[in-house]
Image (spheres, helix red, strand yellow):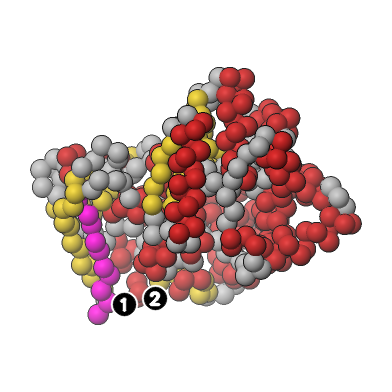
Amino acid sequence: MQEKVIKAISDYAMLKDATSVTVALSGGADSVALLHCMLSLKSRYDVKVYALHLNHMLRGAESDRDEAFVTALCKKWDVPLVVAHADINKESAKTGESTELAARRVRYEFFERERKGVVATAHTASDSAETVLFNLTRGTAAAGLCGIPPVRDIYIRPLIFCTRQDIEQYCEKNGLEFVNDSTNFTDDYTRNKIRHNAVPVLKEINPSFESSVLRMSAYIREDNSYLDSVADAEYKKAVSEDGLNTENIGKLHPSIAKRVLKKYFGRELDSVNLELLYKTAKGEIGATVLPLGVTARVKNGLLCFETEQSQSDFSYKTEIYKENIKKVNSLLLKNALDCGKIVGVPVVRQRQPHDSIRLTNRGVTKTLKKLFNEMKIPENERAKLPVICDDIGVVWVCGAGAAERVRVDEKTKEVFVIKTEKILG
């Protein structure tokens, strides 16, 4: 297994210029093997190794068992560890996301906040093959056949050439203990059905099934990368602070035009809805209703998105209150401000001309006009969206989160918690 990890790190330059690696450690066999392997290779790459663990609070005592195991393991191996807790069921109910999507979002917010250097996740060749099959059953475009990318932004997948069998053999050879997630053994989830039923049949046909899928995904990823680069260039020509100019959409190759539209919409679209959006942008149909109650239409040559709520009269109720904290809760991040970093008294108001904000982990300052455009906030909602400022400037924007300079961190003792509610009427 270690040879495959070394090859993956080399082929994809995973540790180029890296001085630290943070392992996302669940306590399962894959992540334990990854942590053990990175520790054995840290002198080879001259990196420091850290670990992160998020208790999703989804499996009761089993989730607490996982946390206790990870804590003991990192103490035994002398690995600096940061643990956080998040009530994913509560977060899912609050945002309307599925449990899986809410867990993923909160988990990656935690990784980005606490990481040191790059983040190594324990995705394997088997995981990537299952992802391709899962996407295939839903009817996917080329992007869905690319599998799990070996490198994405700050995230690296050193186990991407390793199969689940490689992991099991590595753990047995090195006497590694790990915990099992009981939900992995049922067929209640589509991915488990694929893993337990479809993959064994495909491996009977081709024992190197995972490797074959990896090879196919790499070819498609190359082609997809080129098409995306062309689409990005066209997107930059068409987009402005006022919207997306549709004048040339019909002149572009459909593959490029649809990529431009997906990028502008900013959320996942299935093939049926993407085709309808494409026809709308070309003027073949007047408007189309997309997922989440969003209506797309062209006005004065610009593609616009409207929501059902944006077409009603509404207002926002916003509350700010102080709260002492002992441990940083990842669910607080977007809607909490460090009291000690606020200059003066926080005030709730609406956007004003030339307002700008440098959001946490974004590394760039943007005007609220540009930010609202990127967030696809309808024009008639922008004037009502609550904004919080202190004596220096904007520190929080509804839906976008807190400014970098007032972010909550491990030194925070007291926070301003923000609660906002959209009231229709």
Question: Which element carries disc 1, helix, strand or loop?
Answer: loop
Amino acid type at mark 1 = Ser
Q: Residue at x 55, y 61 (%)?
A: 268
Answer whether residue 122 is visible to the viewer in this image.
Answer: no
Disc 2 + disc 1, Cβ < 8 Å: yes
Q: Left or right: where does residue 341 sit relative to residue 271?
A: left
Q: Which residue is mark 1?
A: 312
- Foreground pick, 62 / 249: 62
**Quadrant hosting residue 201:** bottom right
Residue at 31%, 77% in the rendered image: 312
Across and down, in percent, residue 55 comes to 44, 52
Horizontally, is 107 left or right of 209 in the view?
Answer: left
**Judging from the image, what secondary structure is the residue with disc 2 in?**
loop
Region rendered in magenta: 415-425
Q: Residue at x 71, y 44 (%)?
A: 168
Graded by Cα atoms within 10 Å as few (under 14), some (14 to 19) or many (20 or more), the crowding at tag 2 reads few
Q: Residue furthest right?
A: 205
Count of marks placed on residues: 2
Is 344 on the left-hand or right-hand side of 55? Answer: left
Taking depth in this image into account, of 160 and 421 the one nearest to the observer is 160
Our reading of the magenta stretch's main secondary structure is strand
Across and down, in percent, residue 225 comes to 66, 44
Q: Quadrant of the N terminus?
A: top right
Per the image, is 417 magenta? yes
Give me the C-alpha separation between circle 2 and circle 1: 7 Å
Look at mark 2 in the image and give the residue it sits on.
308
